[in-house]
Amino acid sequence: MTQIIVLPHEELCPKGALFDAEPGTSICDALLQHDIEIEHACEKSCACTTCHVIVREGFNSLPEASEEEEDLLDKAWGLEANSRLSCQAVVGARELVIEIPKYTINMAKEGGKK
């Protein structure tokens, strides 16, 4: 099991969280399994940016992002070099520290407009 630390998020996880996740699980699924209701408007199909997270520690332990994920990330609010779509980033063996951005852009709902 891999430890995931979620930094406090005003609405989704005010006190932060600490839990173990099974390697091979997406970060999104791990969050949802632990009652952190991260938005995932496209049902985890890599078609929006609502599940965008910033990986503060352990980023290099994740498999590389696909070109499709990279293209979508360019449209995410608050993009950083260590941003990932949590539906695409798969937990490995190294501890992760995750920050959920304060805002999100729903590309599907908002018609791809920023």
Image: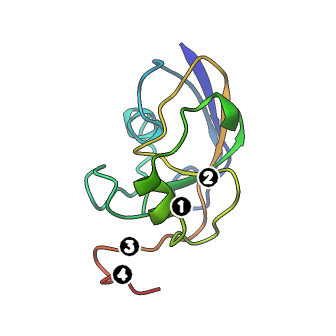
Chain-order first, disc 3 or disc 1: 1
Q: Amino acid at mark 3?
A: Asn
Residue positioned most to the top: 1
Q: Amino acid at mark 4?
A: Gly
Label 2 crowding class (10 Å Cα cut-off): few <14, some 14-19, many 20+?
A: few
- Left or right: 47 as drawn, with respect to 85: left
- Which residue has dot 2 on it? 14
Q: x and y percent of residue 50 in the render?
A: 42, 63
Comparing labels 3 and 2, the label whose residue is closer to the camera = 3
- Which residue has dot 1 on it? 11
Q: x and y percent of residue 14 in the render?
A: 61, 52
Do the residues under discs 2 and 1 have CB atoms within 8 angstroms?
A: yes
Q: Secondary structure at mark 2?
A: loop
Q: Which mark is residue 106?
A: 3
Calculate the distance from the C-alpha at mark 3 to the C-alpha at mark 1: 17 Å
Comparing labels 2 and 4, the label whose residue is closer to the camera = 4
Calculate the distance from the C-alpha at mark 4 to the C-alpha at mark 1: 24 Å
Q: Secondary structure at mark 3?
A: loop
Calculate the distance from the C-alpha at mark 3 to the C-alpha at mark 4: 8 Å
As drawn, 10 above or below 98: below
Q: x and y percent of residue 9 in the render?
A: 62, 56
As drawn, 83 above or below 55: below
